[in-house]
Amino acid sequence: MSRTAASAGQPNYRLIRYVLLAFLVIWLVFTLFPLYFAVITALKPVEEINRMVPTFWPETFRIDNFSGIFADPGSLKSLIDSIIIASANTALSLVLGTLAGYALARYLRGALGENLAFFILSQRMFPPVAILIPIFFLFDATPWGTDSYITLILLYLVFNMPLATWLMMVFFRDAPKELEEAAYLDGYTPLRAFFKVTLPLVVPGMISVAMLCWIFAWNEYLFANLLTGTTVKTFPVHIPTFVAGSQTLWNFVMAFSLVAMLPPVILFIILRRYMVRGLSLGVVKG
Amino acid sequence: MARVTLDKVNKIYPSRHGDVHAVQDLDLAIEDGEFVALLGPSGCGKTSTLRMIVGLEAISGGVIAFDGQPVNDQTPEQRNVAMAFETYALYPTFTVAQNLAFPLEVKGVDKATRDEKVAEVARLLRIEPILDSFPRQLSGGQQQRVSLGRALIRDPAVFILDEVMSHLDAHLKFQMLFELKRIHQTLERTIVYVTHDQMEALALADRVAVMSDAKLQQFGDRDTLYDRPANTFVAGFIGEPPTNFLEAEVRDDGTTMRLTIRDASAAFVPDGPRAAAIRDQGLRTVIVGIRPQNLHVRHDEGDEQITATVEINEYQGEHSILSLRDGAAEFRAMVPPSVKTGEGETIDLSYRSRDVMVFHPETEVFIS
Ligand SMILES: Nc1ncnc2c1ncn2[C@@H]1O[C@H](COP(=O)(O)OP(=O)(O)OP(=O)(O)O)[C@@H](O)[C@H]1O
Ligand SMILES: [Mg+2]
């Protein structure tokens, strides 16, 4: 009796570990399969892509698909357009979000500040499709019209600035106020104390925020497709244009998508160290 | 150089759960060049008082003046005060040397002079080996010394030091106390030093302001605080081990007065002036305060005596602490370590009648 009780009371750690590992494997299958399929499709010739039973390994490799996509001059231009819009929007979001976040963290602490901060964040939860039509007419009425860089740069602020403001507010709350006070005593003005003492503390947070904003602007399709497309064309809008008559050239679509994945991946690899630190700072202390 | 006066200063923090009255009607006059310690238990309003003096916190009521000029509306920079923070507040992105040089850099001091002063302060505070480290690489005590150094490097009207030695070990603290005292003697600047450690306060300060519960209890030099404490709080806070407090009934036959400890056989005899004061006020009961140091085994001419039972004889190196019992009353005495009286044995102890402190039974105010 006592023996069974003892073994029942002891959890089987090895079994638990295997179960958890199994979940991880399932998770990897789900997340990596699309990538795998994109890679093999990008390497197939046109004849192989529309088989009823798809091949899971290319019968003939077509590396030159990757150069083929750039035969269309619009391909390179769409990547450049995307880079311009994502970067400009990120810079603006960061400047505005940092200053607003600082104001919320330092000067609006009571109930008013809490409510205002939450209201700002709630903008991000709003379903964008609901305002698609009004947004179109709004930008149509501006001097620069809908089809321009400035349209998307400003429009993406609607989504990125609330997030940037909220996150920067959390980072600034973690930055001790005494540091600024010490700087005041030593003769700094509030503005100098902010730039010289407090801002350096939240740089890791700013990098994380920049990543999030940049990736959102890079990937956005819905508004870009509706508002722009002639003078300005971002890469998500360019992707569906790889067609020959009624046939979609999936190998080109996949090759171009893989190329478009490179900038964010490279950025992420470079900035990963700062980014994880910044995000966990917010999570732990927020 | 400045004379700092606080006149009925109040600090009220508004909060959702009702206002916090952190400093209440505080009057304090600190002379130019004086070293004053602000002493009190945690949460009594010391930091709030300092923050109002330096100008980081709005003054809810009253006037703070430097050399007679009200400074209520001046910025911290205009007041020209240097402060070492309880939380150190070192700039994490600067090295120790840069932290120390920062206040000078802001004032536009040239590099050569800056380096010279940094080296001087570093030597004084024994932080030369860590000058190139960043604050996060330092121990608490090292950070505390850097923070003190950043205040001392300046040449302000007043130095404000908030618990700058709380994280130093006893040996280092002793050295730092000595250095600080010497710095004060050479600079002759007004220093306000906050601490909850009475040993530090008494060792350093010309005068000590004892605070409790947002209010000033007493402001005086160490002899006054020790011999004539304003109330039981001050008597209990100053001195280690703390003063014994015993409730006593007044037995008076007109010529000799005996203060009989409640539910015990011992009685204390106060000296003449105190007996007269008790008679004047017509008190039937009082609180007797007697310091453990003032209960002796040696009997001198004219001493009074009591007898008690030893419960614990605790050896502490240079002296022993006896925990004593007499009836329901418990108290302690500090005796030489040669006293070997053990548990359950009785001992005779002498005291001088002028060491018997007497407090009012309700207001707990000192009766002189
Ligand atoms: N910003 C604030 N908002 C609300 N209440 C505060 C604030 N700062 C201090 N208090 C309250 O005021 C009282 C006094 O605080 P203060 O920091 O002055 O104490 P202290 O004597 O410095 O204590 P310690 O020795 O622990 O540093 C405390 O009850 C504290 O909770
Ligand atoms: Mg304090």
Image (cartoon, helix red, strand yellow):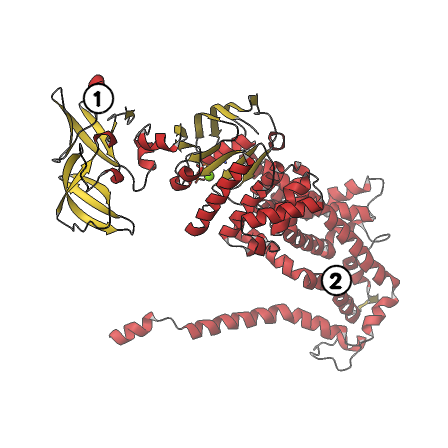
- The image quadrant that residue A143 belongs to is top right
Horizontally, is A274 left or right of B176 in the view? right
Amino acid type, label 2? Pro
Element carrying mark 1: helix
Amino acid type, label 1? Ile
Nearest to the observer: residue A119 or residue B3: B3
Residue that carries the numbered disc 2 in the rendered image = A263
Residue at x 82%, y 39% (from the top left corner) = A141
Is the C-beta separation of discs 2 and 1 under 8 Å? no
Looking at the picture, how far across and down is residue A221, in whole percent? 74, 55
Element carrying mark 2: helix
Residue B278 circle label: 1
Residue neighbourhood size for the residue with mark 2, other residues' Cα within 10 Å, grouped as few (<14), some (14–19), many (≥20): some
Nearest to the observer: residue B134 or residue B240: B240
For marks 2 and 1, give the CA distance.
89 Å
Residue A97: in sight, yes or no?
no
Quadrant of the snapshot with the C terminus of chain B: top left
Nearest to the observer: residue A54 or residue B355: B355
Horizontally, is A187 left or right of B324 in the view? right
Farthest residue to the top: give it.
B280
